[in-house]
Image (spheres, grey):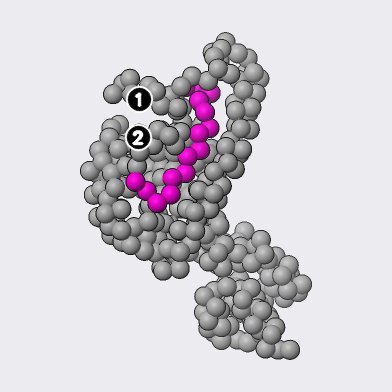
């Protein structure tokens, strides 16, 4: 097993950082920065697969399904991070995108040694959270061999969920039955085997792309503004007023009044402004278009001409 693991791309030595321990602080920083600049190109080369994965997630959301991330170590922490940012950013249910890490929530702060080594734990997780055919399960294993993740994906397929596997290993070394394989081989790490670095950055980039695009397609964004937020603190209240003012060209003070009348929901305030309707009527109007502001506004403008 040790020999096999030693052949993984993520375990190879990087020729550009062979003298790392004797380099100056500036040299080390420049080596890391240079290697990081290679990541975006590696991600761009896998755009077809990332698009396919995002399409699966979009279709799942249309059926009220979920996106479930599963990972271990750094991959699991990034999975939980991405999922946890969705509710406050897009006013989505915490159930819609969920992240799970081998070893449970304890492993988010403290390494749970050996937790990733048991595929049966991954299989058990899929049963515990009730995976079904309308869900997408995305396993994240930068090395490509994490048993917990592979067990999760195997069980997810048995439960007829759509499956995606993200790895930074070369796809020619991956033998797993999934709907979409995203392989982003960023090459050896600056510090050999430290996949929290380049591999972690690639993971964060791809998860951001998939979850953000899926939320946009669910009408959570109008133009490039996050209109599906509910203003629950001072910063969000200010952002909400500025969004309303930007889209409608009304004053900041008028936007504040609209927001208050809409119970602090930006989308409702926008439809109220466009339709001159009350908050409840505007909310029902939005529901007709599954919360899509652009479609709702277009219909209002069409019927008012």
Return the x and y of residue 76 as percentages of the image width and height: 40, 42
In the foreground, 305 or 56: 56
Q: Can residue 78 be seen?
A: no
Return the x and y of residue 172 as percentages of the image width and height: 43, 34
Q: In which quadrant is the C terminus drawn? A: bottom right
The residue at the far front in this view is: 172
Q: Residue at x 65, y 76 (%)?
A: 270
Query: In the rendered view, would you say 154 is above or below 269?
Result: above
Give the extent of the magenta segment: 177-192
Circle 2/circle 1 CB separation < 8 Å: yes
Return the x and y of residue 23 as percentages of the image width and height: 60, 13
Q: Residue at x 27, y 35 (%)?
A: 117
The residue labelled by disc 1 is 5
Q: Quadrant of residue 66?
A: bottom left
Q: Secondary structure at mark 1?
A: helix
Query: In the rendered view, would you say 79 is above or below 118?
Result: below
Q: Residue at x 77, y 72 (%)?
A: 249
Return the x and y of residue 51 as percentages of the image width and height: 53, 53
Answer with mark 2 or mark 1, whichever residue precedes in sequence: 1
Query: In the rendered view, would you say 215 is above or below 47?
Result: below
Q: In which quadrant is the N terminus drawn? A: top left
The residue labelled by disc 2 is 145
In the foreground, 189 or 88: 189
How packed mark 2 is, by other alpha carbons closer than 10 Å (few <14, some 14-19, many 20 or more), is many
Q: Can residue 206 be seen?
A: yes
């Amino acid at each position: 097993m040790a020999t096999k693991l030693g052949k993984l791309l993520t375990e190879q030595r990087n020729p550009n950082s062979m003298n790392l321990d004797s380099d100056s602080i500036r040299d080390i920083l420049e080596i890391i920065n240079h290697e990081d600049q290679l990541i975006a190109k590696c991600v761009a080369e896998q755009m077809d697969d990332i698009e396919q994965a995002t399409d699966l997630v979009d279709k799942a959301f249309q059926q009220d399904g979920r996106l479930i991330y599963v990972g271990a170590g750094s991959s699991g922490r990034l999975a939980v991070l991405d999922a946890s940012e969705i509710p406050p950013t897009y006013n989505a249910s915490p159930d819609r995108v969920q992240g799970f890490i081998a070893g449970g929530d304890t492993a988010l702060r403290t390494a749970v040694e050996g937790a990733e080594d048991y595929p049966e734990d991954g299989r058990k997780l899929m049963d515990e959270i009730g995976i079904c055919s309308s869900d997408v399960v995305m396993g994240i294993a930068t090395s490509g061999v994490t048993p917990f993740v592979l067990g999760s994906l195997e069980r997810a397929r048995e439960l007829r969920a759509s499956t995606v596997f993200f790895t930074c290993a070369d796809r020619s070394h991956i033998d797993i039955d999934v709907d979409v394989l995203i392989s982003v081989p960023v090459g050896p790490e600056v510090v050999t085997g430290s996949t929290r670095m380049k591999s972690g950055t690639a993971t964060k980039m791809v998860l951001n792309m998939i979850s953000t695009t899926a939320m946009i397609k669910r009408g959570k964004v109008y133009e490039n503004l996050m209109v599906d937020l509910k203003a629950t603190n001072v910063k969000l209240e200010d952002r909400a007023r500025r969004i309303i003012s930007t889209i409608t060209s009304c004053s900041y003070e008028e936007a504040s009044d609209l927001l208050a009348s809409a119970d602090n929901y930006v989308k409702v305030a926008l439809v109220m402004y466009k339709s001159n309707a009350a908050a409840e009527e505007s909310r029902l109007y939005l529901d007709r278009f599954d919360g899509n502001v652009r479609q709702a506004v277009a219909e209002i403008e069409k019927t008012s001409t």
